[in-house]
Amino acid sequence: VSTENRFEIPQPLPQYGIASLMGCSIYGDEMPYGFIAAYSQSPHHFDGNDVNFLQSVANVVSAAISRQRTEQALRVSERSLVRAQEIAHIGSWTQDMKTGRVHWSDEMYRVYRIPPGQPVTPETAFSRIHPEDRQRVEEAWRAALQGAPFDLEHRILVDGKTSWVHAMAEFTTDATGQRVSAVGTVHETTERREAQEALLDASLYSRSLFDS
């Protein structure tokens, strides 16, 4: 440190007994995250191995910081998605076509009135379809397995209460054309349906008054 004339050496270094110092930047995606250094309290010549080791440590630290920031951004994005689905009453789901394993978003549980986190299967949603709509939905699903779009509105019946949902789904395939997964959404449309029915009733009532 005492013989370094290329850089301005901070005054506290010699006071703390730092005689030799090497360092490197911890690089980030857009700008450095910080700086890492190693020092000796006696005169020491850091060779290429020392520099490479310190750079390796800096790279590990950089990767850890980047991963932490990515995970944090993902958690924020997931919270935003959950809130957006809750506001719009749209749930989403995925299914592994080979194992049958199903994953539901929180809003899916609310739409089907199931405690969040409870294990679900492909039958969980189908079992709650209104009996009068079940055949139509099953036919649409079988057709979707053959390549037709799955996009329809139907009723669900849970604890004696009927609700309307708009269901959509699509599949992903592997290199051989086999379906490996499915992803879909379920939009609860009960309020819109009830508003449409109320508007129709009002229109019919007005027409009856006019005709009379």
Image (cartoon, helix red, strand yellow):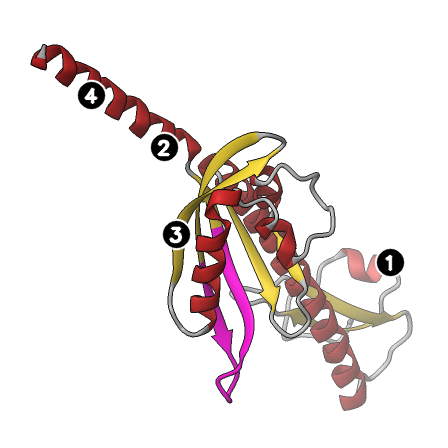
Residue 148, numbered label: none
**Tally of numbered tags:** 4
CA gap between label 1 and label 2 equals 76 Å
Q: Magenta region, mostly helix, strand or loop?
A: strand
Which residue in the protein does label 2 denote? 193
Residue 178 counted in the magenta span: yes
Q: Amino acid at mark 4?
A: Leu
CA gap between label 3 and label 4 equals 27 Å
Taking the spot 69% from the left edge, 42% from the top edge, the residue there is 116
Taking the spot 69% from the left edge, 71% from the top edge, the residue there is 99
Residue 84 point in image, percent of width and height: 48, 41
Residue 112 point in image, percent of width and height: 59, 40
Q: Amino acid at mark 2?
A: Arg
Name the outermost residue toward the right.
Answer: 42
Quick one: label 3 or label 1, which is nearer the N terminus?
Answer: 1
Crowding at label 4, few (<14), some or many (≥20) Cα neighbours within 10 Å? few
Which residue in the protein does label 1 denote? 16
